[in-house]
Amino acid sequence: MSDLASSSRRELLKQVAVGAAAVGLSGYGAPAAGRVLGANERINIGVIGVGGMGSGHLGRLADWARQPNPKVAVRAVCDVWDKRLEAAKARSGGEGYRDYRRLLERNDIDAVLIATPDHWHAKISIEAMEAGKGVYCEKPMTLYWHEAKKVAETAARTKQVFQCGAQGCNADRWRVAQRIIQQGGIGKVVWSQTGAFRNNPNGDWNWGIDPSANPTNLDWDMWLGWRFGLASKRPWEPERYFRFRKFWDYSGGLATDLLYHALSHMLIALGPEFPTRVVATGGNYVFGLENDNREVPDSFFMTVDYPSQHTVVLPATQVNEDGLAELIRGQHATMHFEGPGIVVRVQRPFAGKMLVKASSGVFEGAEIVRNDQGEVAEIRIATDTNEDQGAHVANFLDCVRSREQPHLNAEIAYRCMVAIALGVASYREKKVKLFDPERQKVIQ
């Protein structure tokens, strides 16, 4: 499947979006309201998917739950593999489930953290919000763009808090950048660059395979999700389970695993827009020549055009770690995200204009650096650069109580997902992908 998923997957999402009986949960119809929480009341959370990222999140939540006067309690955990499930139960003290639907039936669960493979994100997120639970879903928001639309619509309709778990979004510099850009601090924004760069000789995502895992202790059919139209039915393949990011059925590769992080930062700073045109190229330049059966590319290069007349360039590779600086380029100055904050470097022809701006409230509290001619050369802005994943989860929990919008809420996450998913589709189909922001539809 490319950007157009199978008809069964589309039909599933239609059913899930209205809380239909097809999802196999009792008591569905109108969305459940969930508990009303006091300012100091514990949030009861369930963790769905406790391998990899899920295990890390679970450990953090369990540590928080053991602190004096805790504001969170891990009440339930879910995983299809018994070994991971038993370890998660012991670590958290929560009740364990193989089937996430049983966890969602519990009225005492206020929120869930979803860390399953990508192809499950939409279905579980939608059902959880229908069940009256806030959702923290690991990135990417979904696997396909139309799934993200359904998730965003469900969040709006149910009024549940949704946070996508892209790393770095908690750092305050993105919101400081947004304010400066909105006030014209760097002039008309013209293009930006960000990306992801690694070099692993063994190949990213070639995680270890536990020989004890097999269909007697692991619900392989449930993991695939073929009964729900999420992926193709196939015999047990340990590599697909342990190294799922290498395969299109369950992941979008570099785009969904790494570039989703990078683009989400940009959309917070620039203001969230739907794309109008997305094109991507790349290939398996190293691992395609070796004994590695990955389907996704080891190098991926994507450009995204936006209706505000602005382009974002997003390269990603697993075979060279020399990266590009993270920049937002305006006509008057370029915004660099480096060190402890933001450095705005002035474009020479606009030094005079930037002197006026530097004297105004746009850069209040910033350090002004001048060149030998006395012109403004740089403007340095100190910001909070707390990019810790725990802070992002804490932001979600705070919003579950306050009912405010978290940093990477459903609307921003949806717009990011459209661009990322269309990049994957462009690469796979070898086509430029066009999107209509007004109708929120791909233009065929």
Image (tube, rainbow, N blue to C red):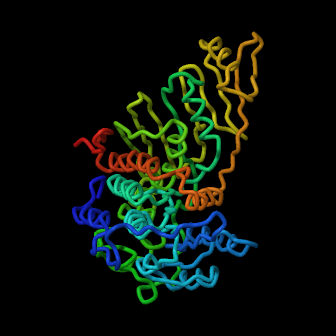
Tell me the residue at 44%/32% (across/down): 311
Quarter holding residue 178: top right
Quadrant containing the N terminus is bottom left
Tell me the residue at 72%/13% (across/down): 375
Where in the figure is residue 333, as x and y percent of width and height? 60, 23
Image position of 249 (left or right of 372): left
Where in the figure is residue 310, as x and y percent of width and height? 44, 30
Q: Nearer the viewer, residue 118 or 432?
A: 118
Q: Nearer the viewer, residue 440 or 292?
A: 440
Q: Nearer the viewer, residue 386 or 134?
A: 134
Regarding residue 424, the answer to whether it shows in the image is yes
Regarding residue 231, the answer to whether it shows in the image is no
Image position of 403 (left or right of 306): right
Residue 179 vs 56, above or below: the answer is: above
Image position of 29 (left or right of 164): left
Q: Nearer the viewer, residue 373 or 39?
A: 39
Quadrant containing the C terminus is top left
Q: How many marks?
A: 0
Residue 260 vs 9, above or below: the answer is: above
Tell me the residue at 54%/47% (across/down): 196
Residue 345 vs 201, above or below: the answer is: above
Where in the figure is residue 104, as x and y percent of width and height? 44, 75
Where in the figure is residue 72, as x and y percent of width and height? 63, 70
Residue 334 vs 27, above or below: the answer is: above
Image position of 48 (left or right of 428): right
